[in-house]
């Protein structure tokens, strides 16, 4: 490949990224082309260095963008509701490519049932169900509960788990609730809301 062709392609790809952030799909495609065609070699030894110095992204973030773009292209043929941002499709990376379109459609249907927009949270919920990371509704036992006697949050890099112990008719029961939100304030507020509901 001649230097003129490499330079022109790199410039064209970079223009897409600079504009882009209009659409993450175009950005991901341009970034993947730079990576796969090794266009970054014009000024950098490694793709990771190129991403860091040119765009301020670490290698993980660049992979997320490329992956989200690939997934969006895959699901675009089976849905009329397309993802608006990279975070909406990020949870789908946990699934096999063949499962991703069906999971996206399931998330769209779930959001419609709830009268919501499709969000990363809704998509994550569907992915968790499909991967078995969530307890089915049938396994949840209803109980009349007295106030929480104790709760302790456990921080995990990807999730926050809250253990809640309830006093119910002389029997102490514990419930484990897992959230994708890792903010301690969110967990505290949610735990207080659960106490009021129970």
Image (tube, helix red, strand yellow):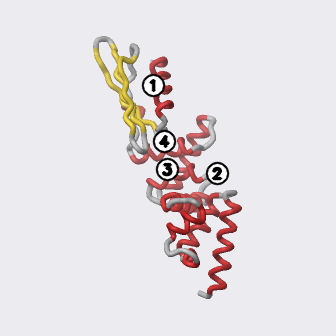
Closer to the observer: label 2 or label 1? 1
- The relative height of residue 194 versus residue 119 in the rendered view (above or below) is above
Badge 1: residue crowd in 10 Å (few <14, some 14–19, many ≥20): many
Disc 1 and disc 3: Cα gap in Å? 25 Å
Which label is found at residue 91?
A: 3
Residue denoted by label 4: 125
Viewer-side residue, 198 vs 147 = 147
Q: Secondary structure at mark 4?
A: helix
Q: Secondary structure at mark 3?
A: helix
Q: Are marks 1 and 4 in contact (CB under 8 Å)?
A: no
> Do tag 2 and tag 1 residues touch (Cβ < 8 Å)?
no
User: What element does badge 2 sit on?
Assistant: loop
Mark 2, Cα crowd under 10 Å, few <14 / some 14-19 / many 20+, is some
Q: CA distance from mark 1 to mark 4?
A: 19 Å
Of marks 2 and 4, the one in the foreground:
2
- State the quadrant of the C terminus: top left
Q: Nearer the viewer, mark 1 or mark 4?
A: 1
Q: Alpha-carbon neighbours of circle 3 within 10 Å: few (<14), some, or many (≥20)?
A: many
Q: Label 1 belongs to which residue?
A: 191
Residue 81 falls left or right of residue 61: right
| Label 3 vs 2, first from the N-terminus | 2
Going 37% across and 24% down the picture, which residue do you hit?
151
Please tell me the numbered disc located at residue 122: none
Residue beneath the point at 46% across and 33% down: 184
Return the x and y of residue 50 as percentages of the image width and height.
Answer: 55, 69
- What is the total number of numbered labels drawn onto the structure image? 4
């Amino acid at each position: 490949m001649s230097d003129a062709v490499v330079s022109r392609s790199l410039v064209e790809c970079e223009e897409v990224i600079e504009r882009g952030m209009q659409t993450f799909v175009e950005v991901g495609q341009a970034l993947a082309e730079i990576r796969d065609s090794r266009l970054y070699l014009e000024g950098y030894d490694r793709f990771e260095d190129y991403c860091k110095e040119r765009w301020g992204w670490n290698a993980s973030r660049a992979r997320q963008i490329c992956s989200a773009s690939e997934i969006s292209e895959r699901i675009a043929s089976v849905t009329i509701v397309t993802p608006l941002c990279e975070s909406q499709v990020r949870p789908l990376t946990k699934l096999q490519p063949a499962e991703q379109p069906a999971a996206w459609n399931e998330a769209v249907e779930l959001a419609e049932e709830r009268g919501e927009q499709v969000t990363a949270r809704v998509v994550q919920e569907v992915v968790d169900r499909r991967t078995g990371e969530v307890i089915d509704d049938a396994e949840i036992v209803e109980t009349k509960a007295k106030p929480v006697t104790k709760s302790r949050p456990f921080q995990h890099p990807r999730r926050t788990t809250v253990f809640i112990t309830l006093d119910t008719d002389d029997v102490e029961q514990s419930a484990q609730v897992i959230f994708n939100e890792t903010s301690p304030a969110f967990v505290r507020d949610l735990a207080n809301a659960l106490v009021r509901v129970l």
